Amino acid sequence: MFSKKHFTIMGLVCAMAVPAANVGAEGFAINEWSAEGVAMGGARMFAENDAANIAYNPASITKVRGEAFKQSAVYISPHGKYKAYDENGAIIEEGKNVVHAGWAPGNYYVKQLNDREWFGIGLYSRFGMISEFERDSIVSSNAFFSRLNGASLTPTYARKFDKKWSAAVGAEVNYVGLELQKNVFISGSPIVVATQTKGESWALGWNAAANYAFDAKNELGVVYRSKVTHTMDADFRGYGIPTVLGGDHFTTAHGKVTLPDSWAIGYNHKFDDRTRVELNGTYTKWSSYDALNITFDEPFLGQAGSPSPKNWSNGWRYAIGAEHKLSDKYTIMGGYAYDESSIPFDGADFIVPTGARRTYSLGLQYHDKKQTLALTLGLIDIDGLRIKGHETDAYSEASTHDNYAKVFGISYQRNF
């Protein structure tokens, strides 16, 4: 079924992608899976001959002719400011995030087995985030460094049943690396204890997709991605604890991270052979992220754990994207997306300190019979978020404002 060359390409996909799986953008859900996808606002479920369909819509890998290998990298640079208030509503601190830009990678391989069957494998990030604030700030009592590295390996089988129907099913091997750092302010004392929780986990999930073509110009697609639950053992460290209180503390912590399931539905309309538009809606069940509770094998400063209720609500992401072929070799793309905020006031924190988002993007693609190269520029306008202070926080309430992120993407695909 596969030659030595095919296995070599698939091996390169894995080998090159794993070190790059440290997503460096604020947020939790990652939709930036290719430069073309970013250019169309994430509404790219029906692209022709695009190996990144593995991520956007596995049923559409049946649109890949022959064999294709693709690599993509999207650079995201987040910026934002905050204000912290005391119990009387007076501002006690103003600051901004430490700009911690990074890359969202995507690696894809698709092989057409015969006239009806396709195989594909992707390695990309479905979830990830990083946020950082000054270590000596008041908000450090909530979080001064938070990172979730995520990577999904998705072997996929797709079948074209006839001219109208195609479907796909795939497994997901999901990796999560979690690191949380915060300060503990000991009441009535100038002592500040820095803590770090760090662990990683592997878990399994699955996905399924189906496409239906009404005619040559109109197509509908649906994609389901399952929930993935990680039960994690982590290393917990507390630094700067006076000897009278037991000195520095090292123990094992335990927690659970649930990555939510989602449904995506898309509609594609071709005006002619040169111009098409996509509409997309993605419903994510963020309610499964109800808490981020951590327990310790050995109590830390008299506490058996660190409870953190979230109680996020389910939410929609809406997107529209268009592409137009300027010639046989060049295509322009544009897109807009709107993400609802799912974070409630009493479940908000400085781990994910962002509200609703609006994404504006443009892209250009060069293509010939053997390869495509795409470049994208985008801007994410991010609403502020009100954050309730909890018992261990050094503020009563906080809010973020003037949030945005700059985006740049590049993709290269080689056809064989």
Image: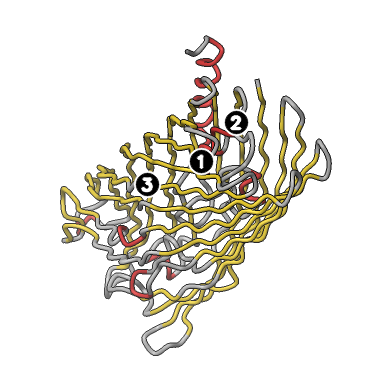
Which mark is on residue 64? Answer: 2
Q: Position of residue 133 (x, y in %)?
A: 49, 61
Q: Quadrant of residue 380?
A: bottom right
The residue singled out by tag 3 in the image is 178
- Under circle 2, the secondary element is loop
Q: Classify 152 as above or below 129.
A: above
Q: How many marks?
A: 3
Q: Amino acid at mark 1?
A: Ala
- Under circle 1, the secondary element is helix
Q: Amino acid at mark 2?
A: Val
Q: Earlier in the sequence, mark 3 or mark 2?
A: 2
Q: Position of residue 38 (x, y in %)?
A: 62, 50
Alpha carbon separation for disc pair 1 and 3: 23 Å
Q: Earlier in the sequence, mark 1 or mark 2?
A: 1
Q: Position of residue 337 (x, y in %)?
A: 59, 61
Q: Earlier in the sequence, mark 1 or mark 3?
A: 1
* In the foreground, 234 or 67: 67
